[in-house]
Amino acid sequence: MRVAVVGGGWAGIAAAVALARDGAEVTVFEAARTLGGRARRVTLEGIDLDNGQHILVGAYRAVLGAMRTVGADAGALLVRLPLDFAIVGRFRLRAPRLPAPLHLLAGLLRAHGLTVRERLLVVRFMLTMAARGYRLRADTAASALLAAHGQLGPPTDYLWAPLCVAALNTPLPAASAQVLMNVVRDTLGAERAASDLLLPRRDLSALFPEPGARFVEARGGRVLTGRRVARVTPAADGIAIDGERHDAAILACAPPHAAQLLARNALLPEERARLEALAFEPIYTCYLQYPPAVGLPQPMLGLADSLLHWVFDRGALDGRRGLLAAVVSARGAHEALERGEFALAAHRELARLVPRLPAPEWSRVIAERRATFSCTPGLDRPGNATALPRLILAGDYTASDYPATLEGAVRSGLAAARLALAASRTA
Ligand SMILES: Cc1cc2nc3c(=O)[nH]c(=O)nc-3n(C[C@H](O)[C@H](O)[C@H](O)COP(=O)(O)OP(=O)(O)OC[C@H]3O[C@@H](n4cnc5c(N)ncnc54)[C@H](O)[C@@H]3O)c2cc1C
C-alpha cells in the first residue's frame, strides 16, 4: 500500500506514523523546510523560537499516544503542572490533590477573585452541565449559554472567557458553546490529570513532528521537506501526487491551502466550498529577551484588562532565562499595530507585571493571521472522507467535537490514516 500525505503538520505526521506503523509505504510531502506546520520551530535572525507559544493539556490523549508511539518522551519534553489558573491580581483557581470531581469542586469553592455567591454559581453550572453530559440541545454562542446560567461578571471575565479564547481562539460572543463545553468536559470535568497543563520544554517541531518523521523513515517511508505539491489527480485505483501514483492520498494542509489545491485540480467542489466558507482567527506571539534575572512567579500567567492574554516564562520551561513569550489570541485592536509598536506595547504591559523591568535586549513578533478557524456555533466542518474514497482530508478543521488544536489535528490524522488503509485494501 502506497499512501501519500500532503502536509507535514501535526495531522499529516500523525497520519504518516499510523500508516507506517501498520505497514504502509508512506511519502510525506511538506512545502516548508521545517516540519510542524502551525506548531513548528522558526529561526528568526539566528534565534530558534516557535511560530507561537503553545500549551497542551493532560486531556490530549491522542497527542500523548502519538508521542509515545514515536518514542518522544512526554515526561522529558513537557513540563506537567497541576491546574493553576491565574489571572494576575484578579483570579486564581487551583485544584487540590483530591479525586475528581472533588478536586474541581474544592478548587472552585476556594477560588480567589470570586464572591461566595459567584463560586456557588460556577459550581452549580458545572454540576448542571455534568448532569447533561455536557450536551446542549442546540448550539449557541458561548456568551449566551453563560448568561443563561448566571455566569456573567467575574466568572466569565476571569474563568470562562480566558478558557474560551485559549481553547477555541474565538471570543465568547462568537464562540460555539457546545465546543467550549466539550473542552470543559474533557478537562475540568474529567479526571484530575486531564486539566494538567503540559508546557513544551523543547521547540514544537522536536516534540512530535521530527521524531514522527524519523519513525516513518525508519520503516521505509519518505518525508520530503521543501516539496510543495501542485497536482493532485485521480488515477487508476489511486491518486497521483505530482504525477506519482499512490493507492490513497491524505490532504493534510490547512483549509486555505487544501481549498487552493482542490481548486487548482478541479476536485471535490462540495468539500472545497465548505473549506472556503471557514473564517479564521489570528494569534500573535511576542518574544522578549530580558536579562537572565527576569522571570515570572509562574511559568504561565493570564492577564486581565491588558492587550496581552497570557505570558509565559520560557526560562522556566526551556532554560532560556529572561525570555518571555506574550500571547494575544483571536482578533482585536492589536491587529492594527505595527510589529515594533506591538512589541513596545507588550513590554509596557509586562512592566506592569514585573517590578523594575528593564528594556528587552531584543524582541520578535510572530503574527499568525490564520492561526485557527473561527470556532462558531453549529459550524459545518468537512469530514475526513470525501466524494473520492481514496482522497482523504486531515487537519484540525475536520468535523469533530474539538476546536482547532494539536489534539484535534492528531485525532484527525489518525482517523484519516484508518480511512486510507481501508480504501487501499479495497484495491
Ligand atoms: C500561534 C498559534 C498558537 C496556537 N496555540 C495552540 C495551543 O496552545 N494549543 C493547541 O493545542 N493548539 C494551538 N494552536 C493550533 C495548532 O497549532 C493547530 O491546530 C495545529 O498545528 C494544526 O495542525 P494541522 O496539521 O491540522 O495543520 P498545519 O499545521 O497547518 O499543517 C499543514 C501543513 O501542510 C503544508 N502544506 C500546505 N500546502 C502544501 C502543499 N501544497 N504541499 C505540501 N505541503 C503543504 C504546510 O506547510 C503545513 O506544514 C495554535 C496555532 C497557532 C498558529
Image (spheres, grey):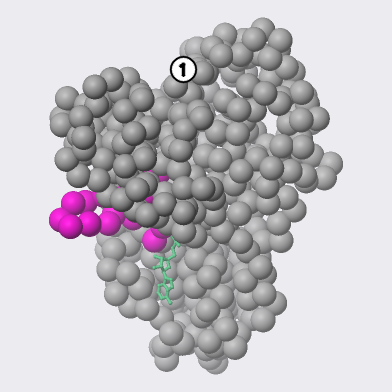
* x, y percent for residue 274: 67, 70
Residue beneath label 1, please? 89
Q: Extreme right residue here?
A: 137
* x, y percent for residue 92: 50, 17
Can residue 64 be seen here? The reply is no
Looking at the rendered structure, the kind of residue marked 1 is Gly
Pick whichever, 18 or 158, lies toward us: 158
Residue sitting at 64 percent across and 33 percent down?
185
Decide: is 329 above or below 276: above
Can residue 326 be seen here? The reply is yes
* x, y percent for residue 254: 50, 65
- Find residue 189 and report its image quarter: top right
Pick whichever, 356 or 246, lies toward us: 356
Tag count: 1
Decide: is 305 above or below 273: above
Residue sitting at 20 percent across and 29 percent down?
358
Residue sitting at 73 percent across and 17 percent down?
121
- Find residue 134 and report its image quarter: top right
Q: Is residue 165 left or right of residue 353?
A: right
* x, y percent for residue 318: 24, 36
Residue sitting at 61 percent across and 61 percent down?
279
Pick whichever, 3 or 154, lies toward us: 154
- Find residue 7 and report its image quarter: bottom left
| Magenta part of the chain | 37-54
In which quadrant of this rendering is ligand 1 seen? bottom left
Is the CB of mark 1 within 8 Å of ligand 1?
no
Q: Is residue 63 left or right of residue 154?
A: left
Q: Is residue 263 left or right of residue 56?
A: right
Secondary structure beneath dot 1 equals loop
Q: Is residue 38 magenta?
A: yes
Q: Is residue 18 magenta?
A: no
Tell me if mark 1 has few (under 14), some (14-19) or many (20+) residues whose alpha carbon lies within 10 angstroms of its own: few
